[in-house]
């Protein structure tokens, strides 16, 4: 419901002159003589404008109206606040009930899915529990997709475990196959190390003798001995 101030189109703190000017403007706009074809509507609006101006133009009546209006507004605001709170409580209770019902339907769908039933069975079970078709379809789709994802994850984990065991078995077999070859190589290396010194001893002795002969040939005493031996041979002849 509009206030008297709103009827004249002025704020509640308007002055007397502002109220008078607003009244004249509104009266001219809604005068029946200016609204041909809509005289009834204009006449009703014009009467409201006159009543509003009659009260607001009188200081005493305006004060009474402001006091009554202020009190009525307080009461109206209090009632409006109470209605809003009650409405909020009802909406919260409705949401809680709806969430509880949804959670129950999801729990039922998961239980049947764990038993191995497919999406169509879940949908039928939910319809049998008085679940709305649209919600039943949504829950059935979601739960079926969740179960499929869980199965894929479990299969992937099993495959990874099998692959790990296969790799370990292959490594163990390769290690067992390489052990005899390493032992044979070690034996060949030991035999070669034992025979090598005996084979090199004669060559070392021959080299030492050659070095002694070379040294004796290069020594001065050895050279003189050779000359003396040749001189004695020449005397015999």
Image (tube, grey):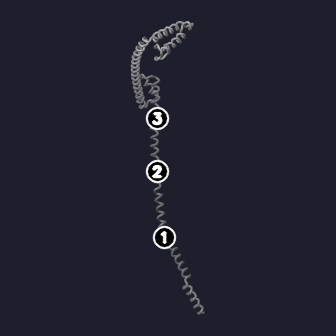
Residue visible at 48% across and 60% down in the picture: 185
Q: How many marks?
A: 3
* Nearer to the camera, 26 or 235: 26
Mark 2 or 3, which is nearer the eye?
Answer: 3
The residues tagged by marks 1 and 2 sit, at their Cα atoms, a distance apart of 40 Å
- Residue of label 1: 197
Q: Give the percent coordinates (x, y) of residue 117.
A: 44, 30
Which element carries disc 2, helix, strand or loop? helix
The residues tagged by marks 1 and 3 sit, at their Cα atoms, a distance apart of 72 Å
Q: Is residue 7 above or below residue 139?
A: above
Q: Give the percent coordinates (x, y) of residue 103.
A: 41, 27
Q: Is residue 234 above or below residue 4?
A: below
Residue visible at 40% across and 14% down in the picture: 67
Q: Is the residue under label 3 in contact with that under label 2 (CB below 8 Å)?
A: no
Residue 149 tag number: 3
- Residue of label 2: 171
Which element carries disc 3, helix, strand or loop? helix
* Nearer to the camera, 192 or 42: 42
Please tell me which of labels 2 and 3 falls first in the chain. 3
The residues tagged by marks 2 and 3 sit, at their Cα atoms, a distance apart of 33 Å
Q: Residues within 10 Å of mark 1 (few under 14, many from 20)?
A: few
Q: Is residue 77 above or below residue 194?
A: above
Q: Residues within 10 Å of mark 3 (few under 14, many from 20)?
A: few
* Nearer to the camera, 95 or 169: 95
Please tell me which of labels 1 and 2 falls first in the chain. 2
Q: Is the residue under label 2 in contact with that under label 1 (CB below 8 Å)?
A: no
Q: Give the percent coordinates (x, y) of residue 166.
A: 46, 46
Please tell me which of labels 1 and 3 falls first in the chain. 3
Residue 7 tag number: none
Mark 1 or 3, which is nearer the eye?
Answer: 3
Q: Give the percent coordinates (x, y) of residue 161.
A: 44, 43
231 relative position to 201: left or right: right
């Amino acid at each position: 419901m509009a206030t008297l101030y709103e009827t004249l189109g002025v704020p509640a703190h308007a002055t007397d002159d502002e109220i008078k000017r607003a009244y004249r403007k509104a009266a001219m706009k809604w005068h029946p003589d200016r609204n041909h074809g809509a005289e009834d509507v204009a006449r009703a609006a014009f009467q409201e404008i006159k009543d509003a101006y009659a009260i607001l133009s009188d200081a005493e009546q305006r004060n009474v109206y402001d006091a009554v209006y202020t009190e009525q507004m307080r009461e109206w605001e209090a009632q409006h606040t109470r209605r809003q709170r009650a409405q909020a409580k009802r909406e919260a209770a409705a949401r809680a009930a709806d969430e509880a019902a949804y959670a129950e339907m999801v729990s039922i769908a998961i239980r049947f899915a764990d038993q191995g039933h497919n999406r169509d069975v879940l949908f039928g079970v939910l319809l049998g529990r008085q679940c709305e078709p649209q919600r039943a379809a949504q829950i059935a789709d979601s739960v079926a997709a969740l179960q499929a994802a869980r199965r894929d994850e479990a299969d992937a984990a099993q495959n990874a475990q099998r692959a790990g065991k296969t790799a370990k078995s292959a490594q163990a077999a390769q290690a067992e196959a390489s052990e005899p070859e390493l032992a044979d190589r070690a034996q060949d290396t030991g035999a070669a190390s034992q025979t090598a010194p005996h084979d090199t001893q004669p060559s070392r002795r021959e080299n030492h003798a050659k070095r002694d002969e070379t040294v004796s040939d290069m020594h001065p005493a050895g050279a003189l001995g050779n000359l003396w031996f040749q001189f004695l041979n020449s005397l015999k002849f």
